Image (cartoon, helix red, strand yellow):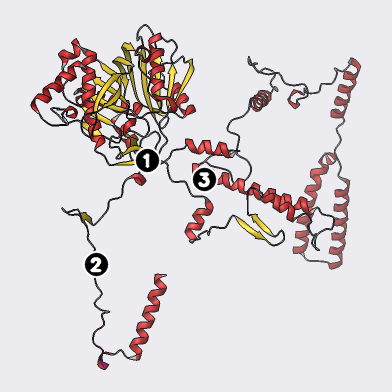
Amino acid sequence: MAETDQKDINVIRFTDNACKSIQVDKLLDLYLDLGTLLAIDTNDLNNKELQSRKDQYLKSLARDNTQILLNSIWELPTEKVENNIVAKLPKSKFILPREKPAPKPKPLTKWQTFAKEKGIKTTKKSRVTWDEVLNKWVPRYGYKKTKAEKEKDWIIEVPGNVDPYTDMFEKKSTIKQEKVAKNEFQRLRNIAKAKKTKVPSMGLPPTPKMTARQLNTAAQVANISTASLGKFQPKLKKEKTLSKSSVLNLKKRKLPAPTKDEEYNRNLKLADSLINKKPKLNLEKAVNREIFDQETSISERKKGGGNKQRKRRNNQNSKAGREFKKTTGKKRR
Amino acid sequence: MLRVKKPTTHKGKKFILDREPKLIENKKESLFLHGRKGSEIINNCLKDLYHFKKPDAIKLGEKNDFLPFESSSEIERLCKKHDTSLVFFGSHNKKRPNNLILCRMYDHSILDMVELGIKNYRGISEFKTEKITTGLKPCLIFSGPLFEQDSDLKRIQNMLVDFFQREDATNIRLQGLEHVIMFTATQDELLMRSYRILLKKSGCKIPRIELEELGPSIDFVIRRKKLASEELFKLACKVPKELKAKKVKNVTKDVFGSKLGRVHVGKQNIHRLQTRKMKGLRKSASERRKLRANKEKRKRDGK
């Protein structure tokens, strides 16, 4: 303080100006940004004084710089607001980084793109409409709309082409629910399109993050899906044991071991069937063929046909005979 | 707002919308954090700085066991959670005693980070003066040629302005200019001083300024720094197209201050100029029909 006062006295001695005490001389002009109330002084510091009388020197430096800053602030256009003199600050020039990047334009929805393409312009509708039945203004949507609707539709006529016992109120609510669901689906579809995620046209997408329970069942299914039904699979440390009611827990049914007699009889039966193997006879087929042969031979005789025909028929007969052989081969042998 | 889950309440919706990127941004909020261990000096320093930033600052009480210079994820998470973009992180250990880390964010990731060691510290409580009112916009002064010469210090200066400038103001009450913060860059130190402004009579309109030290007065040493690359910084500083002032074309002001406008007149169509009417120049019926057909055709094409 004392230092600054001395300096001012010096100034007084040489200048007779009335505003001497607010003048500060600097070698280089300060960079001033009045928008941020910022002053940058790039003049050299007095290192000697900075070391010897640090705080006092800094204070005098701050005083001078503040004086310069406030001198220019006082020159700004002012106005009076509630008995206070207020200076209008210009826009700040000092460039500071933003906090977040600038917002990107919202991606258009499917309807919006269509409307844009077709040049459809939506006209703004009023929020309330005059209701003839209720004789009052009723909102189109939102707050107090359902209340008005209930008031209006306390009774609904069942149309002639509908079963007279249908609940029209229920029908109305399901229609409304479906509309809401459809709108929600479309909203999600628009989001998926904007985020460029692939969504199947039908059904549900696979859950990206399965729950612990889902993962556990998946692991258990994988565990059991071996030829030996997971008998030799190593167990994991944290693996949960299957619940008793689980389908995966069902073991293959095992019959009790046969007694000696039972086994003997069973084997004997098997040996018997092998030794006494009889050719199978397809009775129906054999009979049919026999009838056919008879009929053809009769008709042949009646015609007294030529060589050619006989040849062909013989061929046919041989073919049929072969098939017959196949089925009754054992017998002939 | 591209969210799969819709906010259920209006209040929730407002909250989410407030955090979304905007053309004209909210004022930057600051977050005050303590490291694993603290000292009296660093705790007091954080308290004093918190007092300067108060209405738009959040001070978290618990200790945080992470080092911002080693792992940035934790600090980014906290900033995202509280929607803050300026961080004051105070820590104290043997290697770096009384450590103050200043960190600012862009798009929820670290932009600039600088570590300041406190060499000398005198807190607000040590100065027996009135405290300044909270929420006051301070005047900022930077002195020392190093702020201009050293590119790193220039960035740190930018950071300090960002940290202490508070929100943009269009009007300011002249008697309300109370507080000055001065940063001085010497060869090896960064000195922070804060003063109260006393307006004294000077005999003319502009008052004479006297200062009274208010505290805190801190001598910092710059330790580590992690400053954004020039490209990233430029990207962060980019002013959106919508906010840029549109260039006014064809309007100038002359020496006397009167406004001059230049009007461009398009090329005149001389062919349709009405000249003297004469029977000989009249169009025949067939010509007129042809003209009308042409006109209609043009109209259709135009539509």
Helix, strand or loop for disc 1: strand
Please, what is the three-letter code of the amino acid marked with disc 1? Val
Which residue bears the numbered disc 1? A81
Judge whether residue B186 can be spotted in this image.
no
Q: Is residue A233 magenta?
A: no
Which residue bears the numbered disc 3? A193
Principal secondary structure, stretch drawn in magenta: loop
Can you name the residue that lies furthest to the left here? A14
Res. B265 mark: 2
Residue A82 is situated, as x and y percent measured from the top left of the image, at 39, 39
Please, what is the three-letter code of the amino acid marked with disc 2? Val
3 or 2: mark nearer the eye? 2
For the residue carrying disc 2, how many other residues have a C-alpha within 10 Å: few (<14), some (14-19), or many (20+)?
A: few
Quadrant, the C terminus of chain B: bottom left
1 or 2: mark nearer the eye? 1
Which residue range is magenta in the image?
Answer: B274-278
- Horizontally, residue B276 falls left or right of residue B16, namely left
Helix, strand or loop for disc 2: loop
Q: CA distance from mark 1 to mark 2?
A: 47 Å
Helix, strand or loop for disc 3: helix
Residue A308 is situated, as x and y percent measured from the top left of the image, at 74, 63
- Horizontally, residue B142 falls left or right of residue B134, namely left
Seen in the picture, residue B155 relative to B38 is either above or below; the reply is below
**Nearer to us in this view, B77 or B248:** B248
Residue in the image at 51% along x and 41% along y: B2
